Structure formats: C-alpha cells, structure tokens
Amino acid sequence: MHAVHGGQVVPAVYAHAARRSAAVAQEARVALAFIAPFFLGFFVFNLLPLLYSAYLSLVNFNSFSEAGPRDFIGLRNYLRAFADRLAMASYARTFLFSLVYVVGIIVLGFVTALLLDRRLFLRTASRTMIYMPYVANVIAIGIVWSIVLNPFGGPINTLLKLLGIPEPALPQWLTGVRSALPTVAGIKVWQNLAFQTIVFLAALQDVPRELYECAQIDGAGWWRRMVRITLPMISPTTFFLVVITVIGSFNSFSIVKALTDGGPGHSTRIITVFIYEQAMRYSYYSYANALACLLFVFILIVTLIQWKAQKAWVHT
Amino acid sequence: MKMVMGFILAAALLLPGTLFAADAEKVVTLYAGSKDASDNTWKLRNAAFEKATGIKVVLQMVPGTEDDFYDRTDVAVMSGDTTDCIRLTNPLHTNRYAAAGFLLPLDDLLKKQGYNAQAAYGKFLRPVNGRLYYLPYEQSIHSVYYNKKIFREAGVPFPKAPWTWDDYVATAKKLTNRSKGIYGSYFVLEWEYYYYMLARQRGVPAYKPDGSSNYDDPAFRDALKFMYDLGETYKVGPTYREYLANKYTWDTFAATGKFGMLCIGSWFTGLLTDPVTYPREWDWGIIETPAAGPNGKNNLIAGGTWAVLKKAKHAENGARYVSWVAESWYKDAGGLPARVNLTPADIQGILGASIAEKSKGSVTVKDLDAALLHNSLGVQDEKITGPKAKEYTDIIKREAQMYMSGEQTLDQALKNIKEQGDKALLSL
C-alpha cells in the first residue's frame, strides 16, 4: 500500500508515521507556546537575577557608585564572609530561628489540622478564620504584635502580672535580647500556620478510613493508630511541608524587619537582614551577593540532606 | 476611510505625548519620604513655588523611615533614575552623595539664572573640588526644648542658662512622675549621634590621625554611659527597651506632651509651630544646650542641603527649585536659614516671624536668640563625617544599643566599636 506524502509517493506505513510525527511536532509547538510565558518569567525574574548575583559576588562592586563593569576579584568576597564574625553569627542565628520556626509550625500545623478534622462547633468558621493571619499585611502584623507584646503595659504582660508573676520575671518579648528571636519565630508561626494546617488537613482526609476501622477492631488505641497509621500515611505530605518550610524560614525577612529591624542589638539580625544591610546601608553589593550565594548553597545542602534522609521515614 | 481612521489613530496617540512634552518643561521632580508628603509645610512651600514660578512640583514617593529613604534613593540614583532634586538631611548623606559623584554641579546652572550663591550662603557653602554641588537650606543649632506645662505641674522653675548636664539631670528628676506617665528627659535613641554627643561637645575627634577609630578615648565612654544612666540609673527618661517597646520616634516629644525636655536641632521648631501636623495643648520653652563640663562648652550644629541629581531630567528647573527652597525653607519649616546675607535685624525678624509668632506666645525672639545664637557656647559638628562615616556610625549605634539593652557591658561595647571601627576604616 502506498500513499502520497509531501508530494511524493511513499509506503503507507511511512506516510502514517510522518503524519503522526508532524502531529506530535505540532502538539509540542502548542505546548511550548503555552509554557513559554512561564519560562520567560522564570528566566527574567529568577534565573537571570540568580546568574547576575553570582557574577556580582565575584567582582568588586562594594561602593556607592554608578552601576557598571567591575574588576573581577574571584572569591575574595567569600573569604571575607568566612572571616566576618558578624556574618557567621547571623548564619548561626538564622539556623536557630529556623529550628524554632520549623518545629513550631509543623507540630502546631499538624495539631490544628487534627482538631479541624473533627466534628467541632464552628468548624467551618474556624477553617476560614485560621487563614486571616496568612493574608494579613506584614506591617499591620508588626504593629499589632508590638502593641500586644509591649512588656511595659501591653495586654499579655498585664495579664501575666494579674496572674501573680512578679515584674522582673515578666518576659521581655520583642525587646529582650534573649527573647526577641524566639518571639519573632513564634509570631511567624502564627502568621503562616494556615498553609501547613490546610495541607495537613487534606492529607489527613486522604487517609483511608478502613485502616482506622481495622486497627480499632484489632484493639489499637488512639496513640497507636496515630503512630502506626496516621503519621506514616501523611509522611509524604510532612516531608514536603518540612522541605518548603525550611527553605522559607531561611528566607525570612519582612517579619523581622517589621517587628524588630534586626534588633535589639544583634539579637534578631538573621542573615537576610544582614545581607540587606550590607547592600543597602553600606553599599557592599558584591559582598552581600556573596553572602546570598552562600545562603543559597547552605539551603541546597540542607535540602539535599533532607532528600536523602526521606528514605528513613517517608512512607511510600 | 482607512486613511482617515489611520490619521485619527495616529493623532490620538501622538497628541497626548506632545501635550505632555510641552508640560515637561514646567515640571520639577523631587524625592519625598512618607512623612514629607503629608507634612503641611511641604505642601505650603511647594504650592508657593508653583505659584511663583509656574513650575509644577511632582513628588517621587519613597516609602519607609529615614534610613529606608536613603537605602532606596541610593539604589534609584545608582540605577540612573532621572528624578531632579533630593534633600540631604544631614552632612553624612551630603558628603556621601557628593563623594560618589551623583550630584550635578550647580555653578553654571545658578549663573544662568543670575543667582549668586556665594552672596547668599557664604561660609555655609562647602564646594567639592572647587565646584558647588548643593545649597544649604538650614543651619541646625541644638538647644533644649521644654514642656512648660510639665514644669508648672511639677512646681519646677524653668531652666536658666548657662547650665550643665548635671543641672539637666537634676531638673529631669524633679519633673519625672511615673504615675502620670511623665519623664523629665527624652532623647531619640535611634539616632547614633546622641551616643557620642558629649564627646563631640568636648571636641574629641572620632578618628585618630592615622585614620583609625578614636573610640578608646575616655570621652566616648563618658558620653555613652551618660545616655545609659538617663534611663537605667537616674530613671529620668525611657530606657532603651521602653523606647523600642513603645515605638517612640523622633517626633514623639512634639506628638505626645509626655516628656519634660528634649535636646535637639533648631529644625525642631518647625514641629512645635505646626499646629496642623502636631496639635498641642501645652506651651514650650527653649534654652541653650547644657555644657559637657569645663571642656565641653560647645553647641552642636549640622545642616541639611538640597541638590540636583546628576541624571536630572529637568536640571534647570531643579536648580531653580533648589535655590528657591534653600532660601525660603525656614519660612514654613521654622529653624534658621544658613545664610550670610541677612543682617542681625533680618535674623531677629526671622526668629520672630518664623518661630516666635507661630509659637503663639510660647517663646519670644529674645528666648530664641539667647538659646540659639548669642550664648556662651562654641560650636562643634553634630555628626561624624569622615571616611566611611556611615558604616562607622552604624557600628557605634549597634554596639551602643546592645549596651543600652543590657546585652553587653560598657567596656565590651567600646572595645567592639574600636575593633569593628578599625576594621571598617582601615580596610580597602
């Protein structure tokens, strides 16, 4: 059997293959057209700035002057970062901040999802209200929490005083050098709890009920069902949330700026605030980019470790 | 038909552009911070300029605090933004912008306008490499402003000059009444120069001759300890933690009426004579700055400037605005102009018309003259303005605030300032 394809007589099977190949190519072109806007945006707003940041970290653009070509200085900015006690302290502070934030939000998110998964009074309203902090403006959050946590006459400390806690023992919240960092982390947990809660809720609702019924028949109590069924079944979701939460926590900036601006002293000067200051206050643009690239590498390493470790606890 | 439609379309697209091009010559753009846009004196001043020149003033808004203002304008200016004019509120910023080459020389532009800057500003002009890059709009002279109502309620007589910081503390103790939420003293603890104010009064330099930090001089120790003691030891002012917790700022004294005294520059008279932005139920007084001991009989001075940016789109309009606003700033904003072509009678007139009359009886010309101009004090620059001044003063501020909040001792703070200061100042 023969057919005409492209003005030539060819065996029918080849014509069919050629038409199919043309259709696939056409489909590919259409697909490219659909994803091109995303790739254009990703290229312009993500990849290009990333590459330019890496370039800036290798040149000497550390002064308040016109943007333009600079001398290449290799890894000097990176060596400066490792020798900078304040920079290293900021990285360490960021790690502590992330520890408090990630543990807090994952645990609280899970517990809140468990509560919202039950039949409780005003469940629908609760599911809506939990999103309010998530959509609130960060500056408004900063102002409100500064008032609420004012150690001198704010409502929280006033209540604690009424409960009998002596004044010297009252927490200093955002104004104490030891309490400021965990307080900011706590407020960030409150702000972002909704996302983790909703994702956990969806995962909990996906767990087959028959598993719980079988476990109950076998005499498993609540805790055993939690440990042997719930946690393993939602472990892929937990893994996903831990990964994105860790990445997000290392990039925290606006909440710290709104609440404490890195103070008091250095106590909440996490690495993003430090990078901002190096660039915007002192015009050390290349140095700030080197710090940012180091942060990127650090987050990448942490993510890879988590990725490798998932085999140990993520149920597939 | 197609041709007609094409013609109409082209006209519709081009006409607004040509209209705008015609208006573009009658525009001047300025960077303005959040508070500037809502400041009544800015509105009055710009309206008067528009009326006098026919040039429309367009504000380029820069949101955030004063620090944020310069963080953002720095980036905009570096990126080639074409805004015309910028206000540089203190010598730190003026020197930075001039040194970085972001300001347009004004000599030729002012000459074209027939404006003689030398005759108007004389000694207040600071040419850079022989060229004029900015015009000063004020000379800011420190003095102590006090809340007369708090003094009367405490039964304390108004302070009399000459006096010292010990007298200031003694007075503040009598005014402080925590049960009424009143403190006798207030300082803007987010401003770094207060942490070395006493040392500046004593004329102690911030840099050693070799360019390193001079922060191991005992004068800086005394200065920082004084600030700490006001809140923590004498308890006459808010502690640093209270300052942070209550979100106090540079205008809290004028806005709240809860503080007895504040030592600050003469630009502050603009707030105290602006009933629209800062409505008050209390009257105020003014007295010269206390002396910092026998070697510290100096007042602190500073001054802001206006400049035209190098990439200004309307450079001539910008120069016109700068020359106009530098001469007339004091009329709406209070304070003192930085001018040499004013006679003593002119100055007295300015003190009267711009400040005393607007104070609605709070102060007289005599009070202002004695506090600001004719007193026993010499002058010293308020700010540190040498090499890498911004980084140096930020180090001072950070370490001082860690000491103020109890995170480190005084000795640790001074040691850190010296070490970090040397590292910053002596590095390439």
Image: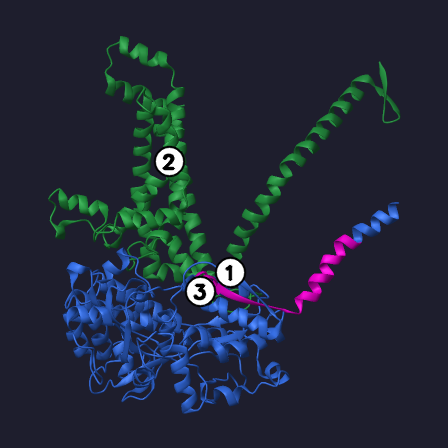
**Looking at the figure, which quarter contains the N terminus of chain B?**
top right
Q: Position of residue B407 (x, y in %)?
A: 22, 60
Q: Mark 3 highlights which residue?
A: B39
Residue B379 vs A314, above or below: the answer is below
Q: Which chain is green?
A: A
In terms of secondary structure, where does tag 3 sit? Answer: loop
Q: Position of residue B211 (x, y in %)?
A: 36, 80
Which amino acid is tagged 3?
Asp
- The answer to which of B394 and A286 lies nearer the viewer is B394
User: What color was chain B assigned in the picture?
Assistant: blue
Taking the spot 22% from the left edge, 85% from the top edge, the residue there is B162
In terms of secondary structure, where does tag 1 sit? Answer: strand
**Chain bearing mark 3:** B
Can residue A76 be seen here? The reply is: no
Which amino acid is tagged 1?
Met
**Disc 3 to disc 2, C-alpha distance:** 47 Å
In terms of secondary structure, where does tag 2 sit? Answer: helix
**Chain bearing mark 1:** B
Taking the spot 85% from the left edge, 16% from the top edge, the residue there is A2
Query: Farthest top residue?
Result: A217
Q: Mark 2 highlights which residue?
A: A242
Do tags 3 and 1 sit on the same chain? yes
Do tags 3 and 2 sit on the same chain? no
Span colored in magenta: B11-40
Q: Position of residue B297 (x, y in %)?
A: 25, 86
Q: Mark 1, residues whose alpha carbon is within 10 Å: few (<14), some, or many (≥20)?
A: some
Figure coloring: by chain
Earlier along the polypeptide chain: callout 3 or callout 1?
Answer: 3
User: In the rendered structure, does residue B33 fall within the stretch colored magenta?
Assistant: yes
Per the picture, the main secondary structure of the magenta-coloured stretch is helix
Lateral position of residue A67 relative to residue A204, left or right:
right
Lateral position of residue A24 relative to residue B180, left or right:
right
